[in-house]
Amino acid sequence: MKGIRKVFPGVVGLDNASLSVEKGEVHILLGENGAGKSTLVKVLAGAYERDGGSIVMEGRDLPRITPKIAQENGISSIYQELNLVRPLSAAENIFLGREPVNKNIRCHLDWNKLYKDAAEILERLNIHINPKTKIQDLGIAEQQMVEVAKSLSQKSKIIVMDEPTAVLTEKEIDNLFQIVKQIKAEGISIIYISHRLEEFERIGDRITVMRDGKTITTVDVNKVAIPGLIKLMVGRELKEQYPEVHKKTGNYILEVSHLWRANVLKDISFGVKSGEILGIAGLVGSGRTELARAVFGADPITSGEIKIDGKKAVVNSPYKAIQCGIGFVTEDRKQQGLVLQMSVAHNMTLADLQNYSRHTKLMLKKEYSVVREYVNKLGIRTPSIDQRVINLSGGNQQKVVLAKWMLSRSRIYIFDEPTRGIDVGSKAEVYALMNSLVEAGAGIIMISSDLPEILGMSDRILVMCRGEILGELKAEEATQEKILYYAAGGGKYIG
Ligand SMILES: Nc1ncnc2c1ncn2[C@@H]1O[C@H](COP(=O)(O)OP(=O)(O)OP(=O)(O)O)[C@@H](O)[C@H]1O
Ligand SMILES: [Mg+2]
């Protein structure tokens, strides 16, 4: 790809970006939120039409790329925001548009073959999903795996993976990297986008750094160290990632006792104090998100009690939860965190609309001035606060969700994977914001699969496994090993 240009209304997405990928290499794209990584690969995959530049594949010029042309040329991509058809099964999604047809009855699908072929691919990738399961019944990590299976079934030459590990746990990442090595050995090239710098040495061959829609440089993975990379990427050196603060913890603001939800949560009891960050670790499927949803009133509970400021509270709907001062940053921003077709401004005030309306009217002036402040505070990159959220880069969308809850004047925050898709520089900003929330007396529950983040930010850590809390660790005594021990069932299910 040479001199690629892509202009969106009000924003230059790509400006003279170039990328060359060799056969059988894992080529990493690195850059801050909004740098243009996703746009560059979308141009390659024909999802966006380019405004300038040339693309040559195996010596052949590709003057125009549509999704179909891309597919015919063996370019397939797994987008940052998954693109599966939720009411259809895993198998139907894998072969969407290429379904096997019944030889005897024309126009009929060969369902047996469909499920058999899907099962074969999933098995080859060591993915344990029933091909008949609907996407909507799968967890987000499993959905990601279905995307991988889908692109592998297409006989691709280049596979783009846009932040594939953002939603995966360590074990699933290991599994994915195993698959990446396997397909690389088959001579397939991979363009890999991630904000997790530690992954690059594990699977990358070369790295191209992007900044402000331009490609800055391409380097060999083993010829550069991480601090050097960060400097190339953000144009400056970064300070301490997990800022040390002197917190004063107060009384319990949230107490949960003997919470049960049939088949999901087992006798969960814990509390969060004002001024405290409580980390919740565990594998995907361990019940962390389910616990968050139960506390937020988004799922019904079978039994149990919730106290806020020492007083019993009935939190049986998100509306009640918000009234009780609970805020919830969900792990899945696209489905649950944002109204994608609405503007940045309107999304940000959604959780506290009363504060911005008089009778039935929105007070736009007030909304705009507060929104502007937060757009600056969080460094959200958007041409205007009227921009529809769907047009922002993934990391900037996440920042809008964070801003929404910060504006909600909550006192108890549940953050489910809060830095998913956020670049290293902005991560430090998010951590600083979390610290300022607890300094102001809030209590935070932070669910994260990123162990360094859990260890760096939490005052206390709960580890969940199979719907229960198996371990509690103080910040001083916690290590990755101890967390993983409990996450794997230590103390109860294994010795
Ligand atoms: N469909 C669109 N309409 C308008 N602007 C867009 C659109 N898609 C991307 N942009 C803008 O183009 C720029 C590059 O976005 P892109 O999604 O490529 O960033 P990115 O490097 O993938 O970031 P992230 O790490 O947050 O995913 C951003 O400023 C973004 O707001
Ligand atoms: Mg992106």
Image: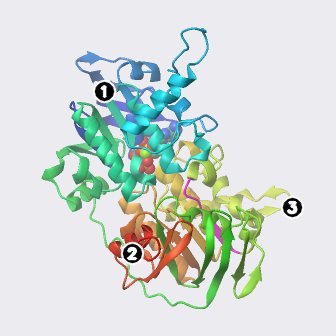
Q: Is mark 2 within 8 Å of ligand 1?
A: no
Q: Residue flagged by tag 1: what amino acid is it?
A: Lys
Q: Determine the secondary structure under disc 1.
A: loop
The dot on residue 157 is: 1
If the picture is divided into quarters, which one holds ligand 2? top left
Is 317 on the left-hand or right-hand side of 385?
Answer: right
Q: Earlier in the sequence, mark 1 or mark 2?
A: 1
Marks 1 and 2 sit apart, C-alpha to C-alpha, by 46 Å
What segment carries the magenta color?
Answer: 325-332
Determine if the magenta segment contains residue 494.
Answer: no
Residue at image mark 3: 359
Residue with the mark numbered 2: 495
Q: Nearer the viewer, residue 424 or 70?
A: 70
Type of amino acid under label 3: His
Picture mark count: 3
Question: Can residue 232 be spotted in the picture?
Answer: yes
In this rendering, would 481 be left or right of 363? Answer: left
The quarter of the displayed image where residue 88 is located: top right
Percent coordinates x, y for residue 301 in the rendering = 72, 67
Name which of mark 3 and mark 1 comes first in the sequence: 1
Residue 405, percent from left and from top: 62, 65
